[in-house]
Amino acid sequence: AQTVTQSQPEMSVQEAETVTLSCTYDTSESDYYLFWYKQPPSRQMILVIRQEAYKQQNATENRFSVNFQKAAKSFSLKISDSQLGDAAMYFCAYRSGGSTSGTYKYIFGTGTRLKVLA
Amino acid sequence: KAGVTQTPRYLIKTRGQQVTLSCSPISGHRSVSWYQQTPGQGLQFLFEYFSETQRNKGNFPGRFSGRQFSNSRSEMNVSTLELGDSALYLCASSLVASSGNTIYFGEGSWLTVV
């Protein structure tokens, strides 16, 4: 069974600095997708960035980028120029490609609470 | 474009009762998935519906069920409520039930079982 592990329950970063959130996963599948979601106090989950496992190039979305190491099964999120609005719970998620079974279950990590210090 | 709408936002139920939560997806989205979020278990996938058919199911007891209507709106039902069912229930929609599709979440329904 697939698992997603976020080993940092909480992280802090100074405003304008850079922070990296860690995520590791375990799977025997070759076709899958990885995501980072942000959950602010409003509790509405917002997609931050996604990565297709078949793509070697790391995904980037403005100040957010990932370091995808497929062999190591690692998927870390780097936030550059941190802003107060980045403070939230961040979840790493795995979704099976389901090419054979047709199942596309999402599996989420336990989350990392990011605090941004002014 | 309106986002994913979940109703009710907050509700309190008594043990043994049953509850129905509703989710209206983004216009044009045909896939709806449900998740349970608790402090102890984190975020867990419940099930996913597409074209009125359940496509995927998580590891939850049969007390948790759902359905999808022809207009893509979805409901989930929990029967014989237990204290442990207290949670934030999140609904998400996507265009189709495909692994690569981005899913968009609603604000959730807070269920408290007393």
Image (cartoon, coloured by chain):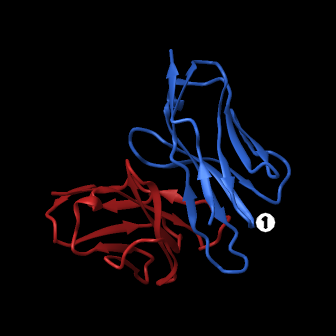
Helix, strand or loop at disc 1?
loop
Q: Please, which residue is most extreme toward the right here?
A: A56
Q: Horizontal and vertical percent for residue A79?
A: 66, 31
Q: In this orientation, which residue lies closer to the viewer: B103 or A53?
A: A53
Q: Residues within 10 Å of mark 1 (few under 14, many from 20)?
A: few
The residue shown at (53%, 74%) is B30
Residue A29 falls left or right of residue B101: right
Q: In this orientation, which residue lies closer to the viewer: A18 or B85?
A: B85
Q: Horizontal and vertical percent for residue B32?
A: 48, 70
Task: From this view, report whether residue A101 is shown above or below residue A61.
Answer: below
- Kind of residue indicated by mark 1: Ser
Viewport quadrant of the N terminus of chain A: bottom right
The residue shown at (27%, 57%) is B86
Task: From this view, report whether residue A5 is shown above or below residue B82.
Answer: above
Identify the chain of the residue marked 1, using the numbered disc in the image: A
Task: From this view, report whether residue A75 is shown above or below residue B88.
Answer: above
Q: In this orientation, which residue lies closer to the viewer: A48 or B2?
A: A48
Which chain's colour is blue?
A
The residue shown at (28%, 59%) is B84
| Residue with the mark numbered 1 | A30
Chain B color in figure: red
